[in-house]
Amino acid sequence: DAGVIQSPRHEVTEMGQEVTLRCKPISGHDYLFWYRQTMMRGLELLIYFNNNVPIDDSGMPEDRFSAKMPNASFSTLKIQPSEPRDSAVYFCASSWTSADTQYFGPGTRLTVL
Amino acid sequence: GEDVEQSLFLSVREGDSSVINCTYTDSSSTYLYWYKQEPGAGLQLLTYIFSNMDMKQDQRLTVLLNKKDKHLSLRIADTQTGDSAIYFCAEMNNDKLIFGTGTRLQVFP
């Protein structure tokens, strides 16, 4: 298996623009997680899905953030409109069950100017 | 509350042992993890320990768990320059991983 795949690897955009980050989990994994990593706040869980259904989105910062999982092999994290404080590395991870090891993707480095 | 704490930096000489420490808050955590993050990369699982264990050894890695003090440590024997990275401990809490701040390990020759 290729592991968790994220795209793009780097994204530079201007304030106010819409940003869409993409993730393909490991095949067969029922859980998918979105994290954000910043110097100030470290690693934060934003939202996670079980069998394509959002279970806990309490970490989503505000209404500008939304996440979807239309099928078992694809998820998106959208920011609209983006702001400079959204600049961070966004990771996607997946696992077989909630208690199993989470496997992380390489991350998307987002810069909002 | 949920708070996993680690020291921010550790510097060791190549060939020496490294010990990275972590304290956690939730005594009901079933699993505790160590992840490694190299520059520009995602998190790679190094090892994990089940809460009913005191110690786990995996080649150069030794994990020690003190449940009474809620203290977790990772020992890397014969530290190499390739071990330079950020190391995160994490506890599983209500199906969510709570990460520590990360310890940046620097290995010098």
Image (cartoon, coloured by chain):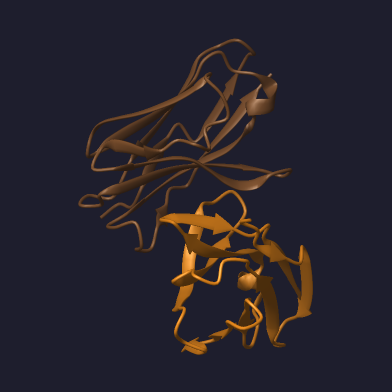
Chain colours: A brown, B orange
The residue at 24%/39% (across/down) is: A73
Confirm whether residue B109 shows in the render.
no
| Quadrant of the snapshot with the C terminus of chain B | bottom right
Q: Is residue A16 above or below residue A79?
A: above
Q: Quadrant of residue A87?
A: top right
Residue shown at 28%/36% (left/top)?
A53
Q: Quadrant of residue A109?
A: top right
- Closest to the observer: B1 or B80? B1
Outermost residue, top direction?
A16
Lateral position of residue A54 relative to residue B98, left or right: left
Q: Residue at x 69, y 81 (%)?
A: B19
**Residue at left offset 55%, top offset 56%:** B98
User: Looking at the image, can residue A60 be seen?
Assistant: yes
Count of labels in the image:
0
- Height in image: A36 above or below A80? below
Q: Where is residue B82 drawn, in percent x and y?
A: 61, 71
Give the percent coordinates (x, y) of residue A66.
Answer: 44, 24
Q: Position of residue A59 (x, y in %)?
A: 53, 38
Quadrant showing the N terminus of chain B:
bottom right
In the displayed structure, would residue B88 be above or below residue A17? below
Quick one: B17 or A79, which is closer to the camera? A79
Residue A102, position as x, y percentages in the image: 40, 57
A89 with respect to A26 (left or right): right
Judge from the rendering whether residue A99 lies leftward or rightward of residue B107; answer left or right.
left
